[in-house]
Amino acid sequence: MKLLNVSSVKRGTNINDVVVPEALRQKDATGLEWIDEALGGGFTPSTAMMLTGDPGCGKTTMLLTIANALTKQGHVVLYNGGEESPFQVKMTVERLGLKDGFVWGEDVFVKDVIEQAKTLAKKLKPGKRVYLFVDSLQCLDTGKYDTGRVTKNTPVQCCEELIGWAKETFGVLVFINHVTKNGNFSGSNTIKHAVDIHAHFGFDKDKKSETFGERVLDISKNRFGVKKSPLPVEMGTNGRLSPKVMLDVETEVDQAAE
C-alpha cells in the first residue's frame, strides 16, 4: 500500500533525529484485562488491527464487547456493520448485557464511513479518540464503479483508505476480515502485511495442544507489542466471552493435596 511509504520525515534524515509523536508512546487500555494483556497493554493510537476467526467462534461478540468497553473509557466508537442489521446487533448487545454502547453505522462506501468518523472526532473529550470498527471489510465499497461492481482489489483499496485515516488522525481501526472454510486468511496478502496487528480468534485444532478444541485468541502480529501466547477463551451461557482458567498438572496436584 502506498501509504506505508508516506512520512513527514525528510529523505536522508538520520534515525537519531526522528521525533516520535508523543501520542505513539501512549496506549489506551480497554478496561478488559485479558484483551489488554493480549495486546501488550492496550491499543496504540494510529493502530490498524485485523481480526480473523473461525465461523461461529464469536468474532462479532468480541468486537461488540471491546467497543462497549472503549466507550466506557470515554472514547467514541463508530461500529460500521454490514453483516447484520442494527436490530440483530441490538438484541446481541442486550443478551450480552453491554450497557455503555457505541455509535452505529451502516455505510457501504468507505468515504462515507471515514466522513462520519471525522465528524465524530469534532466532539471528542481531551485525551480521547475515535475508534472505527468495521464488520466486515468485505462489506465496503470504494464507489469506483457506477454499476456497483467490485473487484478483488476493492477490499485492498478500502483498507488503504481506512488505514490512511488511522495514521492521519491517530484514530484506531479494527476490522473483521473473512477467512476460508479452513479458517485461513482470505484475500490479498497486501492487507495482511499492511495492518499493525493481526488477531485470530478460533478453535485450537492442534491435537497435541493442551487447549485442543478450545477457543483461543492468538495475536500473531503486533508492531506495537510483544508476541503473546494464545489466550484460551470461554463463552458463557449468555454468550459473554472471558479468559478460560487453565490449571497445569502441578497446580491440580497441589489443590488435590489440600
Image (cartoon, rainbow, N blue to C red):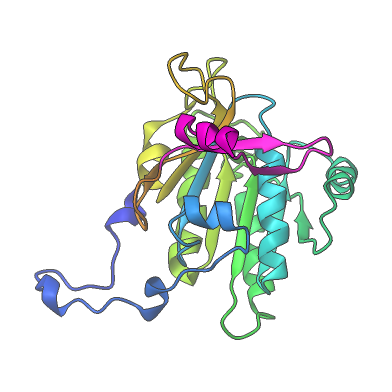
Eyeballing the image, is 19 above or below 35?
below
Eyeballing the image, is 107 above or below 177?
below
Q: Residue furthest bottom?
A: 126
Q: Which residues are magenta?
A: 229-258
Eyeballing the image, is 57 above or below 35?
above
Q: Is residue 246 visible?
A: no
User: Residue 231 magenta-drawn?
Assistant: yes
Eyeballing the image, is 76 above or below 136?
below
Q: Position of residue 112 (x, y in %)?
A: 66, 57
Q: Residue furthest front?
A: 257
Q: Position of residue 222 (x, y in %)?
A: 38, 49
Which of 203 and 165 lies nearest the eye of the viewer?
203
Q: Quadrant of the C terminus?
A: top right
Q: Is residue 254 visible?
A: yes
- The residue at 64%/65% (across/down) is 117
Q: Position of residue 232 (x, y in %)?
A: 55, 36
The quarter of the picture where residue 216 lies is top right
* 220 horizontally vs 111: left or right: left
Q: Position of residue 240 (x, y in %)?
A: 76, 43
Q: How many dots with numbers? A: 0
* 153 horizontally vs 132: left or right: left
- The residue at 50%/61% (across/down) is 42
- The residue at 36%/58% (across/down) is 224
The quarter of the picture where residue 92 lies is top right
User: Residue 219 magenta-drawn?
Assistant: no
* 247 horizontally vs 238: left or right: left
